[in-house]
Structures are given as C-alpha cells and as structure tokens.
C-alpha cells in the first residue's frame, strides 16, 4: 500500500514545464511485487538486491492496471545476533498501464512513471542464526 504525503505534477505546456501541487487528487495505491532477492554476506554486513515485477493501481483499479519493475539495492549491518540496521534505495518504474473496458484503447499510449527513493530502518531476525 502507498499513502501519498506529497505530490507534484510537472507538465510541459508547449514552451516550458509547469509544476503544480497534486496531493489532493491522490488516492491510496495498491501494488503486489514478485521476484528474487540476491544477497551476499561479508562478516557482519549483508549486501543485496531485490528485483520484482509489480502489478497494481494508484486509484483502486478504477482506471486500469499498471505493470512495472522494481529494483531495491540494500545493505544490512548486524548490531547483535538478532538486530540489524538497514540502508538502501528503491527504484520503481511503472512501464505500462492497461485501461479498463470502458476505454477505446487497451493501454495508455506513452505512459511511464518512475520513482526513486531511499530508506533507513531497523530489523529483527528470528530463528537460529544469521543465515
């Protein structure tokens, strides 16, 4: 689930790019991703990369279905046997939007939406060991 806290729309009006606040028009997004996680352990440090194909919607599926890819490189640093801190980035590219049955087209021509962000967090490992 994605809960927008800030939103800005940038549109080219023919001569320049015009920016406007668009938070009031945003809805809760719902996406599901599936894919592998690659991880390497180097002492107390884990480095890795999650790669996922995603499917979802930014508007409760009222205008269609969005397909995309996500990449999330990360570093986990063990503080204790069961506690770690995590740092990373997220790249999210929504590449194709399939429209609902009321539209005259199957997909939205020229649709692309990209998001890049970072994160920091604390995690807890359960079970017997760090593997």
Image (cartoon, rainbow, N blue to C red):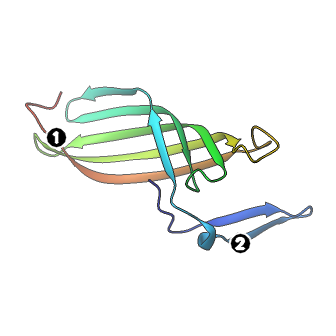
C-beta proximity under 8 Å, tags 1 and 2: no
Q: Is residue 123 left or right of residue 36?
A: left
Judged from this view, the residue extending furthest toward the front is: 102
Using a 10 Å C-alpha cutoff, classify the residue at mark 2 as few (fewer than 14 neighbours), some (14 to 19) or many (20 or more).
few
Q: Residue at x 33, y 40 (%)?
A: 75
Between 36 and 130, the residue placed more toward the observer is: 36
Quarter holding residue 94: top right
Q: Is residue 97 left or right of residue 3?
A: right
Alpha carbon separation for disc pair 1 and 2: 43 Å
Quarter holding residue 24: bottom right
Q: Is residue 51 left or right of residue 125?
A: right
Residue 56 appears at what percent x and percent y? 54, 44
Mark 2 secondary-structure assignment: strand
- In the picture, the quarter occupied by the C terminus is top left
Judged from this view, the residue extending furthest toward the left is: 128
Using a 10 Å C-alpha cutoff, classify the residue at mark 1 as few (fewer than 14 neighbours), some (14 to 19) or many (20 or more).
some
Between 72 and 113, the residue placed more toward the observer is: 113
Disc on res. 79: none
User: How many dots with numbers?
Assistant: 2
Residue 103 appears at what percent x and percent y? 78, 46
Pointer 2 residue: 20
Q: Is residue 126 left or right of residue 107?
A: left
Pointer 1 residue: 125
Quarter holding residue 107: top right
Q: Residue at x 74, y 69 (%)?
A: 19
The vertical placement of 126 against 40, above or below, is below
Mark 1 secondary-structure assignment: loop
Residue 46 appears at what percent x and percent y? 28, 34
Question: If you read the primary sequence from the N terminus, does the residue marked by circle 1 or circle 2 appear first?
Answer: 2
Residue 104 appears at what percent x and percent y? 82, 43
Between 97 and 101, the residue placed more toward the observer is: 101
């Amino acid at each position: 689930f994605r809960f927008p806290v800030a939103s800005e729309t940038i549109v080219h009006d023919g001569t320049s790019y015009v920016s406007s606040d668009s938070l009031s028009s945003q809805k809760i997004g719902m996406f599901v991703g599936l894919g592998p996680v690659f991880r390497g352990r180097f002492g107390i440090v884990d480095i890795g990369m999650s790669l996922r194909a995603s499917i979802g919607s930014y508007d409760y599926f009222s205008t269609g279905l969005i397909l995309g890819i996500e990449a999330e490189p990360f570093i986990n640093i063990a503080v204790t046997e069961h506690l770690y801190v995590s740092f990373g980035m997220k790249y999210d590219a929504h590449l194709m939007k399939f429209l609902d049955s009321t539209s005259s087209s199957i997909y939205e021509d020229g649709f692309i939406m990209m998001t890049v962000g970072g994160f920091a967090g604390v995690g807890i490992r359960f079970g017997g060991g760090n593997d």
